[in-house]
Image: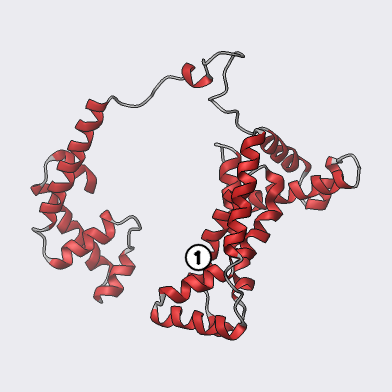
Amino acid sequence: MNHLSTLAASDSLEYYMSQIKQFKLLSREEEQELASRYRRHGDLEAAQRLICSNLRFVVKIAHEYRGYGMKTLDLIQEGNIGLMMAVKKFDPDKGLRLISYAVWWIKAYINNFIIRCWSLVKIGTTQAQKKLFFKLGQVRRAFRQMGDEYPRIEAARELDVALEELEEMECRVNGRDASIDIPLMEGSDYTLLDTLPDPRDNQEQEYLQQEQEETVASQVHGALLQLNDRERAIIEARILSERPATLQDLADRYRLSRERIRQLESNALKKLRNILEPEAAQLLA
């Protein structure tokens, strides 16, 4: 980041801070009343006041993550999304202050943002790996602050992981992605991007594919209308849903046996395959 862009980012952050400081902090009683209004009546104005009064806490939490090389305003933005989710889920009857509950949502959104932006290849595919990613950074900074050399064996012991796991995560943390927009030669506009083939279909192929998908979707929709209500509901729940229902789910819903639901599904599929053209019928395979 050059000097001008650094100043611009600093000015933007200062302006943002000056704006959010205009929102006063809420007392426990005010917070309780607003949270109850939102939870019980869906009062969006109450939700907005809860969010605005806690924005300064998001900034404070975001500053804890400055060592990862991300723009502070980006971290704040992600933290604000976490705060909104916390307000949505917050139960005022449990006796907690909102920020005590929200801090976990705010940190979770910031953590996931850093993981996403660190590399095009996922840094951590499990919660344990994500945890190691952040703890590794903390340990390395602690050793640097003490002026000590960073010892892998002691760090692995401190983090309670095998040395091989630590070394693998180090490689992934140190091997950040290179920009494909950086010129390959100084003074040249020729970049790595210019050397990569374009794998996309041409516009004509994309248009034909889109038209075909719309035709198939229309055929499936028309065929579903020829089923009775229960058959259509079973097919939509079992085949066309992003989260397919189990036979037991539908058995409980219709108070039938699992075998009877299976039979109804099988019969409905036969009807659809007789109606649909081969390409559309493949969706129900």
| Total number of numbered discs in the rendering | 1
Q: Along the horizontal axis of the image, is 123 left or right of 258? A: right
Residue in the foreground of this view, choosing between 171 and 107 = 107
Split into 4 quadrants, where in the image is the N terminus? top right
Q: In the depicted view, which residue is nearer to us: 81 or 224?
A: 81
Q: Residue 19, located in which quarter of the rendered image?
A: bottom right
Q: Position of residue 147 (x, y in %)?
A: 91, 43
Determine which residue is flagged by label 1. Answer: 85
Residue plotted at (61% across, 60% down): 18
In the image, residue 219 sits, relative to residue 212, either above or below, namely: below
Say whether residue 257 is visible. yes
| Percent x, y of residue 122 | 57, 41
Mark 1 is surrounded, within 10 Å at the Cα level, by few (under 14), some (14 to 19) or many (20 or more) other residues, namely some
Rendered location of residue 67, percent (x, y): 72, 46
Q: Is residue 216 above or below residue 95?
A: above
Mark 1: secondary structure: helix
**Residue 271 appears anywhere in the view:** no
The x and y percentages for residue 169 are: 70, 40
